[in-house]
Image: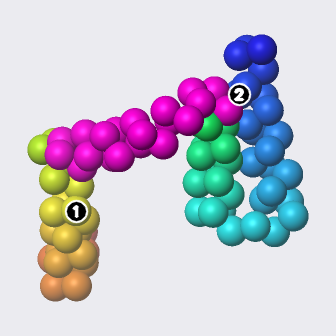
């Protein structure tokens, strides 16, 4: 049965998107639903630990800073000068 889960998840995702549900709610809802069915009630006990583990990753701190640097370069006009030379 587990070999059919990715296909079922994709079909559920595709069907909900076709019916007009927002992408964020569709992705979250399908993942919570299939997580509950595959891992059982313990899934909701493990979910906060997994979220905390991702948030405490020091490598991911660079992502918003990199985006901020890109915005500052674009707003100052420096990015365009760097691309012209």
Along the line of sight, which residue is nearer the eye, 16 or 74? 16
Residue position for label 2: 6
Instruction: Please determine whether, in this image, residue 20 is positioned above or below residue 58.
Output: below
**15 magenta-colored:** no
Q: Residue at x 71, y 28 (%)?
A: 6
Q: Which mark is residue 64?
A: 1
Quadrant of the rendered image containing residue 79:
bottom left
Q: Residue furthest bottom?
A: 76
Residue 22 appears left or right of 65: right
Closer to the camera in the image, 39 or 71: 39
77 on left or right of 2: left
Residue 82 in view in this figure: no
The part of the chain drawn in magenta is 37-57
> Between marks 2 and 1, how big is the CA–CA gap?
31 Å
Colouring used for the render? rainbow
Question: Label 1's element?
Answer: helix
């Amino acid at each position: 049965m587990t070999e059919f889960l990715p296909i079922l998840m994709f079909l559920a995702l595709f069907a909900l998107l076709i019916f007009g549900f927002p992408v964020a709610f569709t992705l979250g809802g399908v993942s919570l639903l299939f997580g509950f069915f595959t891992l059982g009630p313990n899934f909701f006990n493990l979910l906060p630990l997994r979220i905390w583990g991702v948030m405490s990753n020091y490598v991911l701190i660079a992502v918003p800073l990199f985006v901020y640097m890109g915005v500052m370069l674009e707003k100052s006009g420096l990015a365009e000068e760097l691309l012209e030379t």
